Image (cartoon, rainbow, N blue to C red):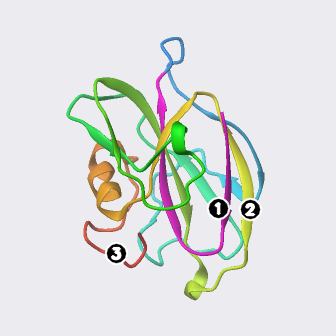
Amino acid sequence: MRLRVGLLGILVGLVVMVFGVATAVASITGSTGDFVIISNPSGLDVSANGYQSNFVIRAFPEQQGVLIDQGLELDITTGNILHTGPETPVEINDVTVNSYLLHFDADNGIARGTVGTITFEEEIIGLITDSARLDVSDSLLGASGVTYTPAGDEELR
């Protein structure tokens, strides 16, 4: 499934997909525009001001094949993918997912418009964009060896 992203400011978003039974590990199958795909994010610092650029949106895989059995709230689902404002979060439960992080942190808070598309192997079931929900998802879905924004630090999220 393809996702188009256009940004003028800061973005940290988590893309959550249904895990395909026949697929052991998911993948990003393509991108255009300002996306840069990072295949091995270990060692990255995506906390506030840790990995800045005014020109690229970085995307990388997080945890793959994670069973969500205690509930996880999504801010944007495929039913409302054209995000126009605050929606009521949708909780998913008893589903196995693959997770990817889309990261854009403008240098000194000054950004030009960044635009691109990203294509995933699986169907996108939703996005997490809310700071508090991203905080919750870091421990559950975050990539090993990646430094995330500390819970409650709203500067980046």
* Whether residue 69 is situated above or below residue 105 in the rendered picture: above
User: In the drawing, does residue 13 fall left or right of residue 131?
Assistant: right
Residue lying furthest right: 33
Label 1 or label 2, whichever comes before in sequence order: 1
Whether residue 122 is in magenta: the answer is no
Label 3 or label 2, whichever comes before in sequence order: 2
Label 1 or label 3, whichever comes before in sequence order: 1
- Reading the image, the residue beneath label 2 is 115
Q: Amino acid at mark 1?
A: Ile
User: In the drawing, does residue 113 fall left or right of residue 100?
Assistant: right
Measure how far apart labels 3 and 2 are at the Cα level.
24 Å
* Whether residue 60 is situated above or below residue 124 in the rendered picture: below
- Reading the image, the residue beneath label 1 is 57
Quadrant, the C terminus: bottom left
Q: Which residues are magenta?
A: 1-19
Q: Nearer the viewer, residue 25 or 129?
A: 129
Say if mark 1 contacts mark 3, CB within 8 Å.
no
Q: Nearer the viewer, residue 74 or 116?
A: 74
For the residues carrying marks 1 and 3, which lies nearer the camera in this image?
A: 3
| Residue 136 percent location from the top left of the image | 26, 53
Q: Amino acid at mark 2?
A: Val
Q: Nearer the viewer, residue 152 or 47?
A: 152
Measure how far apart labels 1 and 2 are at the Cα level.
8 Å
Neighbours of disc 2 within 10 Å: few (<14), some (14-19), many (20+): some
The dominant secondary structure in magenta is strand
Q: Amino acid at mark 3?
A: Glu
